[in-house]
Amino acid sequence: MSTPVLVAVAWPYASGPRHLGHLAGAYLPADIFARHQRAIGNEVLMVSGSDVHGTPITVRAEAEGVSPTDIVDRYHGEFCRQWDELGMSWDLYTTTGTKNHATTTQEMFLAQLANGYIDRRVSEQLFDPEKERFLPDRFVEGTCPYCDYPDARGDQCDNCGRTLDPTDLVNPRSKLSGATPVLRETEHFYYRYSDFEDRLRVYLESRQGWRPHVLNFAKGWLDEGLLDRAISRDIEWGIELPVDDLGPGKRIYVWYDAVIGYLSASKEWATSSGDPERWKHWWHNGDARHVYFIGKDNIPFHALFWPAQLLGVGDRLEGGELRLPDDIPANQYVTFKGGKASASRGIGLTIDEGLALFEPDALRYALAAAFPEQADTEISVEQIGARINEELVANWGNLVNRVLSMVHKNCDGAIPEPQSFQLEDEELLAGIDRHLERSAEQFDAAELRAALRTAMEAAQSVNQYLTATEPWKLAKSDPERGRTVLFAALSAINGCRVMLAPYLPFSSAVLDEVLGPVDGWRRAPLEVGRPIKKPTPLFKKVELDVEDA
């Protein structure tokens, strides 16, 4: 039975180039997972978009002397181009700047306000005395109170990963003027996250199969006690509040509205598909499954704050209660030469730099082989190149090329009619089928690095089979047996390519033209007599010079 699966992917700030850490942390895992879910027949809705309301955008706009819209247009366009070049299979990639997103956010706000989970409070916030304006989080930097990192931002410390408030910083400084900010009173709307502690504890205790670091991180936050958070700011860039209680100069803040993008994007997709009510198939369906792909630093927002916001809506919106996350397979950090990849600090290769050095499938493979699923993972240009050459090219690419070449040369340019299989042939194909079963279980658990390893082990078993049977010798000594061996090897490749298709969409499309399209998560029968042309290599060997490395 088909399952509706929402693949919800973190929304990148349209404030600057994204790096390979972002790609390996959230976006590529989501695409690989979604491709597998579609292959097994599930109804997948994979959504995300560019977050256009974050303070990183206004910080860059201030620095460049342009409008936030100029920054958003530049980087949203860059992201969309990169997704196309990487073969990302979005059902919808949008932005938080749409009227649909604003309306959805305002509707949630009003529902939560009516339910008593939003209130008004006067608080002290940092104010730049030179620029005479309040400073939202990323307009402030200072020393982290937890780890003493000197360049922590007002919303988060890049060093220890703790979420912060600008007033938490030691020795804060304004990014606009360098001045020391002062505290001034201002009134804002607060979301009463603390009201949900008991329900969130029950929710987390009911989660099965979550990665230990995700569950432990979320429970640790909950054990410390959830703080109510301001969800409006003294800014002009953001979604307008649906009530005018606070007067002018206030907007809904990005912490609150960005996660609502998963719901608003689902609605936008449904409208564009011609069935505006179709989003309910994922959000009001007890059989649906919601899987969120994010980085480690986003765990509190998705495991605690977003569920609290969903619970706060209750049944006030059309369709009733909204579905909570079923799984959050958050990845750990990718590091480059010991430092966490960071767009704001310029650490690590950008996606464009990676695409300039490596073919899209090859880059996807090398990053997937190093996904930081359980621990931080170090990568480098040299390591990416080595994985491509020593694993992808030498194992899979070479296997496909040599078997197709032998079939073309020794079987009259077509898939041969096999004779009776021997034990070694049957054992090869039985092993491939077991690898398919094991990889399906790994995919379902979002263990994508392990599933890739399983696929490559299957490919290696075919290489070992060829070494043992030597079909190049059989072509002369026993042509009939040689054709059967090549048929068995090609059948095994037909199973391996199923496991590798989610990782390698471009080269898999080439094999679809040669062997026919993939038919479900199984080793489909070969079409005897199907023409096999002389192949060209699926991948190029990487040649890196010293400057590249």
Image (spheres, rainbow, N blue to C red):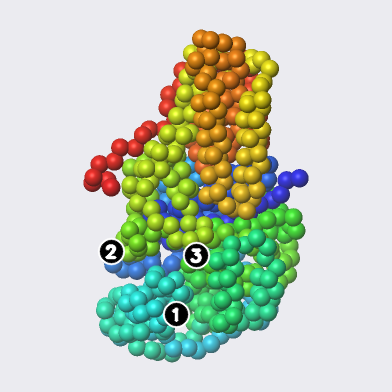
The vertical placement of 164 against 185, above or below, is above
Q: Residues within 10 Å of mark 1 (few under 14, many from 20)?
A: some
Q: Earlier in the sequence, mark 1 or mark 2?
A: 2
The amino acid pointed to by label 2 is Glu
The vertical placement of 122 against 174, above or below, is below
Q: Residues within 10 Å of mark 2 (few under 14, many from 20)?
A: few
Q: Secondary structure at mark 2?
A: helix
- Decide if residue 97 is on the left or right side of residue 178: right
- The disc placed on residue 296 is 3
Residue 306 percent coordinates (x, y): 59, 69
Q: Secondary structure at mark 1?
A: loop
Q: Earlier in the sequence, mark 3 or mark 2?
A: 2
Pointers 3 and 1 in contact (C-beta within 8 Å): no
- At 66% from the left and 21% from the top, the residue drawn is 422
The vertical placement of 226 against 277, above or below, is below
Residue named by callout 1: 165
Task: Report if residue 462 is visible in the image.
Answer: yes
Quadrant of the image for the N terminus?
Answer: top right
Query: How far is disc 3 from disc 2 in space, using C-alphas?
Result: 30 Å
Q: Secondary structure at mark 3?
A: helix
Residue 258 percent coordinates (x, y): 52, 65
Pointers 1 and 2 in contact (C-beta within 8 Å): no
Which residue is at the front of the view, 475 or 498?
Answer: 475
The amino acid pointed to by label 1 is Asp
